[in-house]
Amino acid sequence: MIKNIAVIPGDGIGTEVIEQTVRVLDAIGEKFGHTFNYTYLEAGGCAIDSTGKPLPEETLEACKKSDSVLLGAVGGPKWENIPGIRPEQALLGLRGGLGLFANLRPAIMYDQLKAACPLKEEIIEGGLDIMIVRELTGGIYFGESGRSEDGQSAYDVEAYSVPEIERLLVQAAEIAMKRKKHVTVVDKANILETSRMWREVAAKVFADYPEIKVDFLYVDNASMQLVRNPRQFDVIATSNIFGDILSDEASQITGSIGMLPSASLGVGSFGMYEPVHGSAPDIAGKNIANPLATILSAAMMLRYSFNMTAEADAIEAAVGKTLDDGIRTADIAGGASPVGTKEMGDAVIARL
């Protein structure tokens, strides 16, 4: 099978972790008989430097012609004080331009790294594997906003349509069917009219998925439950702002943000895949960044965009075996002697 991947290394450590991820994909291609063609593109701070824009038109157009997008990281202090321009605008432009409406944020705690988890051992016994499915293009972040004429008040409007909610919940249901068949819809239905609509739409959507257990939690309770009893969750489906907050909370209870992948999906099989971590310019170019989150993002790409389940399983198993063998980059080393970015890539490839 031949797949065309748009690759955006971005800024900081993005280039380093992408390099190792491409090596892993090439190893998968060789092992399973696939060909991955890569088109390297600019976005973020590096694109501001070369074109004056965080997201050049040619980058967006090339992404649209690809089968999937693999992104490293964007941003850094170098571009923080440019009037009206931020590297992160590239992410919003890609999400909007590519029609990516569902953000998948797994919160996985590897048993080999449980010492880094801030929760008590009895709470996390048996490990954590939560998938947060966040609506990405609607809600309060995209609603009407402004200030009064006298400047003494401001407003941001939370608005959702039935189709926006429906497509997100269908995505969550399809993902749950491949997992433990349990979806928790998180809202604030005791206060917000939009949340009451989420519950109404959920009742209709999940009627088509009788195998799935569905429950509902208010967002304040959900945030408490994530630290009190996180193992009760399988798939969490929620709005843009609630998903933004809860996914960051969930990432912290796993103990290492350097291990967490993510995906942003649109209609059909198209997606953009990137690590949760940022560009970390302070360690860029030093061969000490952890590439595993990006490598695991590539595994998500194989699973959700290319329907290559065995290939995704192989990458995830190789990462697990690497950790079993005590191989660590500096961010997850604890007291162990760390390896570099390239050496971690070598280790995963060897275990494929």
Image: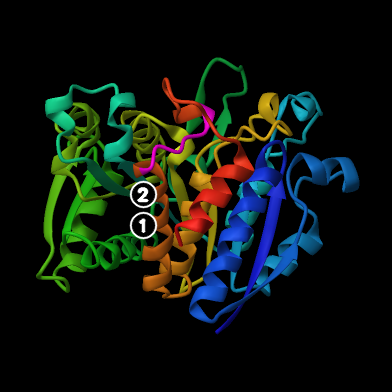
- The amino acid beneath tag 1 is Ala
Task: For marks 2 and 1, give the CA distance.
Answer: 5 Å
The residue that mark 1 highlights is 317
Mark 2 crowd level (few <14, some 14–19, many ≥20, 10 Å Cα): some
Residue 119 as seen in the image, left or right of residue 210: right
Residues rendered magenta in the picture: 325-330
- The amino acid beneath tag 2 is Gly
- Badge 2 marks a residue whose secondary structure is helix
Residue 277, labelled with which disc? Answer: none
Residue 77 as seen in the image, left or right of residue 125: right
Let me know if residue 304 appears in the view. no
Q: Quadrant of residue 176?
A: bottom left
Residue at 10% in and 69% down: 211
- Badge 1 marks a residue whose secondary structure is helix
Above or below residue 27? Residue 223 is above
Residue 326 is covered by the magenta coloring: yes
Nearest to the observer: residue 104 or residue 252:
252
Residue 320, labelled with which disc? Answer: 2
Residue 222 position, x and y percent, is 21, 34
